[in-house]
Image (spheres, helix red, strand yellow):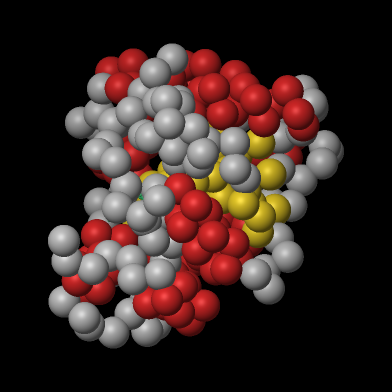
Amino acid sequence: MGSAPIGILGGTFDPVHHGHLRIAQEALEQCGLARICFVPSGTPPHRTAPCASAQARWEMVRLAIAGHPEFQVDVREVFRSDPCYTVDTLTSLRAELGLAQPLCLILGGDAFLQLHTWHDWRQLFALAHIVVLQRAGGQPLGNAMAQADAALQAEYRARLAPGALALHEAPAGRIFVADMPALDISATDIRRRCAEKKSLRSLVPDAVVHYIHTHSLYRPC
Ligand code: ATP
């Protein structure tokens, strides 16, 4: 068996919250990952510009993961202002970590169902495994796949791993579905609560609450 896979969790993290930390923890444990890299996005191609600056989003992730030795933050996207694609980030990580190191791109079920719309999406399977987090109480991913894009369905059928061990046995190319408890937390809701001066406690780590208040983030314009 090869070395334990490294997980990659991309996101806007505007701001990072307990939902993100919980996904990372579940992926770490269910897949036996060595560590997780949080990769805050720069200017995402599919989304409007984040509210908080790159510096603030990066610092909030740093504060949120302090005390979690298996979590780290990677800055290769966050300070870029040009659109950066996941395939480019994985290519650059692969060049650094070597061809043998298993990598796992961690995605929510909703994101996975749209994977065929991503830039150079098939190349993602040559670079990493994909760990799809299926939310408890939601539609099981297997059922949702019946309505998915035909090319994505074919990749899913061909690549579905029977267990997490498969993620350790090859550097890339498998799809593994992990279970995730439903956590009704989103950055959108946190920004709204902030603008309405409502408490953020238990939604984001205390150090991040402090940072948001000290830097007057997410106030109404
Ligand atoms: P926004 O509300 O601004 O869209 P978000 O809370 O969804 O943001 P992102 O930074 O875009 O946060 O999320 C990064 C990843 O974390 C995405 O794959 C997203 O699906 C996932 N995610 C975010 N919140 C949760 C949650 N509560 N439970 C499970 N997955 C989540």
Can residue 185 be seen from the camera position used here?
no
Is residue 56 shown left or right of residue 4? left
* Quadrant position of residue 15: bottom left
Is residue 89 shown left or right of residue 140? right
Can residue 47 be seen from the camera position used here?
yes
Q: Quadrant of ligand 1?
A: bottom left
Q: Residue at x 52, y 16 (%)?
A: 123
Figure check: 110 above or below 197: above
Location of residue 46 in the rendering, given as x and y in whole percent from the top left corner: 28, 31
Location of residue 22 in the rendering, given as x and y in whole percent from the top left corner: 49, 66
- In this rendered view, identify the residue nearer to me: 169 or 70: 70
Location of residue 1 in the rendering, given as x and y in whole percent from the top left corner: 83, 38
* Quadrant position of residue 98: top right
Q: Residue at x 34, y 71 (%)?
A: 216
Q: Residue at x 77, y 31 (%)?
A: 97
Location of residue 52 in the rendering, given as x and y in whole percent from the top left corner: 36, 55
Looking at the rendered image, the quarter that the C terminus falls into is bottom left
